[in-house]
Image: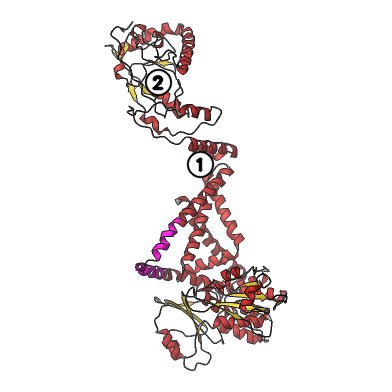
Amino acid sequence: MWVKLCCLLLYFLALFVLARVFEAVAWYESGFLATQLVDPVALSFRKLRTILECRGLGHSALPEKKDVRELVEKSGDLMEGELYSALKEEEASESVSSTNFSGEMHFYELVEDTKDGIWLVQVIANDRSPLVGKVHWEKMVKKVSRFGIRTGTFNCSSDPRYCRRRGWLKSTLIMSVPQTSTSKGKVMLKEYSGRRIEVEHIFKWITAHAASRIKTIYSSEHLKEEWNKSDQYRVKIYLFANLDQPPAFFSALSVKFTGRVEFIFVNVENWDNRSYMAEIGIYKTPSYILRTPEGIYRYGNNTGEFISLRAMDSFLRSLQPEVNDLFVLSLVLVNLMAWMDLFITQGATIKRFVVLISTLGTYNSLLIISWLPVLGFLQLPYLDSFYEYSLKLFRYSNTTTLASWVRADWMFYSSHPALFLSTYLGHGLLIDYFEKKRRRNNNTDEVNANNLEWLSSLWDWYTSYLFHPIASFQHFPFDSDWDEDPDLFLERLAFPDLWLHPLIPTDYIKNLPMWRFKCLGVHSDEEMLETFQDSESDSDSENKEVFSSEKEASEDDELNTFHGHSEGEPRCRAETCSCASKYCHREPYERKARSYGSSSTAGDMEPDWSAWPSEMLHCTECVVCLENFANGCLLMGLPCGHVFHQNCIVMWLAGGRHCCPVCRWASYKKKQPFTHPQPLSNDTPS
């Protein structure tokens, strides 16, 4: 997780540097920066009208360029970045979607139950033509959508009873606006009563109703009273301008931030005395002033702070965010971090996407689960101070120059999604390259794995997890009264050797019993070495014959081990012990042991069986390496009772063969402990 987080931070740093490079290139080619002011006198009439369209100011009654230029100057300073964005938005011929309501419930859910937005709905009465034609309606939809106003069409033929109850007997236009200044307040529906159906007149009707929700100040005394008043609003934004009504984007934002930010329009058109404005630090108009408990902030002085809906919306969201804004931000960051797994994971392509889907599901589930207690804590009354301190921290951090750069980059990359996705893909490919190079230097085999091999390993893991859960292995000796596992036969039927062998953890190996092989006698190690060297030359000539004969005998013994004894109790033969035959026990209740050679390091010595665990079968040869047990060698036993060299059986088990080489009993499963009965008095060694 930390690796993906670091990769994501590196990606954001690369985006920040890339944005600065784009600014430098634009300055080199055109000679201006995005924050540089533009003189409206140098602009054409078309560009001036485009700026007014984006700000939401009516200009249909202004035929002269001079009047249009003055209106642009009265609404706010114009920057190169705002001019570029407005021209790009005008050139874009994207069709804006409009909702078609299916009935009363659909209309209520979207329009009447939406408390923080404006709706414009065209109602088409039964057997009537719409009030606004198709061409004009499309222009209207595109015009109002710039300011976050949603549109829709309600055809009364789909629900005539609801239209009659509402009194919609003729085609009309309905506007939905929040009625109160509190968040999630009531919604009022206003019907268009004008006679002129032009787009400009309808838009003027919309902006007039939206502007009526904004508090307007017409005198300096009223301004002084409002400026010094303390109420529920911690954040207020003032517009000081010489306009008849505030721009449409300002009115639309007042609806969007209902209950969070108070919007106040100060009309200084007929003011003779502006001394109080100078006292509070307002020396020019128009000015957008943000007043917070921490002080005054002049909007428009930093990077990306344009006089537009999108720029001011991003600015206010960073200062006074909702919980939903923070959740959406965390959701985007978590998914961007999860998608890094597609490039960090090495190996088969299918493996990458399977890991990606698993990571996406895990991260999103953890995100939702972690947000639930946060939402619960925010409802507690004694956390109000914590909430206020958090907002104070947001206001301090987001009024810095660095925060303005981040907001400007966010608006730039969000308006160019292809560039954002291409840079993310390029960053991911670089991560994939360096990760692949690192793992190749570490000799990791999974880099070269293909899809088929990985699917095979995935199926192996799935079957092992589903049908072979990890069983806890208890230490020897076994004190439980368990009978032999009755599921062994069923598992052998369900999983024959043709199937993939399950993956069993090897932690149980360290719990297997270990001890050293000892022989009874007083011979020293030097004597044992000399005896072994003398007997080695004699045994080499007979090695082949002894090996073949003993191998046949051992195969017969193995068949007897699998089938058991029909007469009852197992027997032990002298030739099954690799010690001298006169020292081999003939215990009537002892299971026989396999032997593959007649040469013994013990020579004429008897093994010290008292050092062996009571549940282990007695033998002197390892069937894995076919070597006899030497005096002092390290032995290891399995739950079935068979004994081997410690190194031999560990290599056997670690190789994935989790069963006994002799009886095939699972090496990680318990078995009824075998106990040696006391020999009878007449049983003497032969």
Q: Which residue is mark 2?
A: 642
Residue 48 against residue 376 in the figure, above or below = below
Element type at marker 2? loop
Q: Residue at x 50, y 59 (%)?
A: 331
Under circle 1, the secondary element is helix
- Assess whether mark 2 and mark 1 are in contact (beta carbons under 8 angstroms): no
In front of the other: 322 or 5: 322
**Quadrant hosting residue 63:** bottom right
Out of 254 and 393, give the one closest to the viewer. Answer: 254
In the rendering, at what x and y percent does residue 310 appear? 56, 71
Q: Is residue 10 above or below residue 273?
A: above
- Mark 1 vs 2, N-terminal side: 1
**Left or right: where 65 falls relative to 433:** right
Q: From where the camera sits, is residue 423 visible?
A: yes
Image height of 597 relative to 293, above or below = above
Q: Using residue 234 as the reference point, say whether residue 302 is left or right of it.
A: right
Asked whether residue 443 appears in the rendered view, the answer is no
Location of mark 1 (residue): 439
Quadrant holding the C terminus: top left
What numbered label is drawn on residue 397? none
Q: Residues within 10 Å of mark 2 (few under 14, many from 20)?
A: many
Residue 608 location, x and y as percent? 30, 15
Task: Give the magenta part as a residue range.
Answer: 369-393
Q: Amino acid at mark 2?
A: His
For the residues labelled 1 and 2, the Cα–Cα distance comes to: 41 Å
- Position of residue 119 measured from the top left corner of the image (x, y, whole percent): 59, 74
Q: Position of residue 138 (x, y in %)?
A: 69, 73
Is 497 colored magenta in this rendering? Answer: no
> For the view shown, which residue lies furthest in the left direction?
522
Q: Residue at x 52, y 70 (%)?
A: 314
Amino acid type, mark 1: Arg
